[in-house]
Amino acid sequence: MVHCLNNFFEDKHLKGFAYRLKQSKFSSQYVDILVDSLDPRYYLAVECKSLKGKKIYFTQHFHEDKNHVHQVDQISEFLSKTGRRGYLAVEFRGGPGHPKEAYLMPWNEIQKRFGNVPGISIDEFREWVALSRSSETYTLDSLYPKELDNK
C-alpha cells in the first residue's frame, strides 16, 4: 500500500509521501500508514486489513487495547487530533481461483457503520475506491469514487 500511494503521487506529479511506521512491542501504533503532504487532500492516515472472505467484521478484524478502547475509536480520535483524512484499505483474498480485490473506504464511512452493523461487505467497499491489480502490485488512480472524481 505504501508503494501504491507513492507511485500515485509520482504518476500524478503530486507532492506527497507515504510511509509505514515501525511497530514496537511497547509503543502503540495508531494506523499502519501515514501520508504527509502540504495539500490537505493528501494529508492522510490509512489503516490496512487483509482477510479471507467477503466481509470485514468490527469484532473479528479490529482489536481493543488494554483499556478496552476499540481500534475504530482509537483511529477516529487520532484523525481528529491530527487533522488527517482517514481511509481503511482492505484486501479481500478469495482463495484459489478467486482474484484478490482491494479497496479504500473513507474513515468517516467506517465511523457511520461502527456500532450500527456487525461488518462491511465487499459489495459496500466496491462503491468506493477500487485499487487496480497488476501482477503483485496495486495501482491507485484516485482517492475518490469515479462519480466524485470530477467534482
Image (spheres, rainbow, N blue to C red):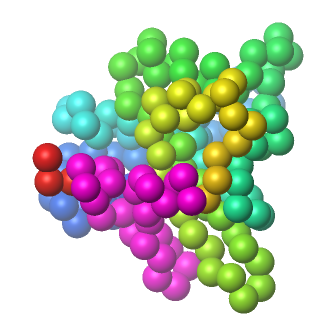
Q: Is residue 134 above or below residue 122?
A: below
Note whether residue 19 is visible: no
Report the residue at 68% width, 82% height from top. Answer: 98
Q: Where is residue 105 in the image (x, y as percent from the top left)?
A: 48, 46
Query: Magenta stretch containing residue 128, yes or no?
Result: yes
Q: Where is residue 23 in the image (x, y as percent from the top left)?
A: 69, 37
Report the residue at 74% width, 22% height from top. Answer: 70
Note whether residue 53 is visible: yes
Which region of the structure is painted magenta? 123-148
Q: Quadrant of residue 111?
A: top right
Q: Is residue 75 above or below residue 145?
A: above
On the picture, is 26 further left or further right than 123? right
Q: In which quarter of the image is residue 86?
A: top left
Count of marks overlaid on the render: 0
Q: Is residue 147 above or below residue 23?
A: below
Query: Magenta stretch containing residue 85, yes or no?
Result: no
Q: Quadrant of residue 59?
A: top right
Report the residue at 72% width, 88% height from top. Answer: 97
Report the residue at 24% width, 50% height from top. Answer: 148
Q: Where is residue 76 in the image (x, y as percent from the top left)?
A: 54, 21
On the picture, is 108 further left or further right than 150? right
Q: Where is residue 42 in the image (x, y as percent from the top left)?
A: 29, 40
* Outermost residue to the front: 116
On the picture, is 103 further left or further right than 49? left
Q: Is residue 16 above or below residue 112?
A: below
On the picture, is 14 further left or further right than 64? left
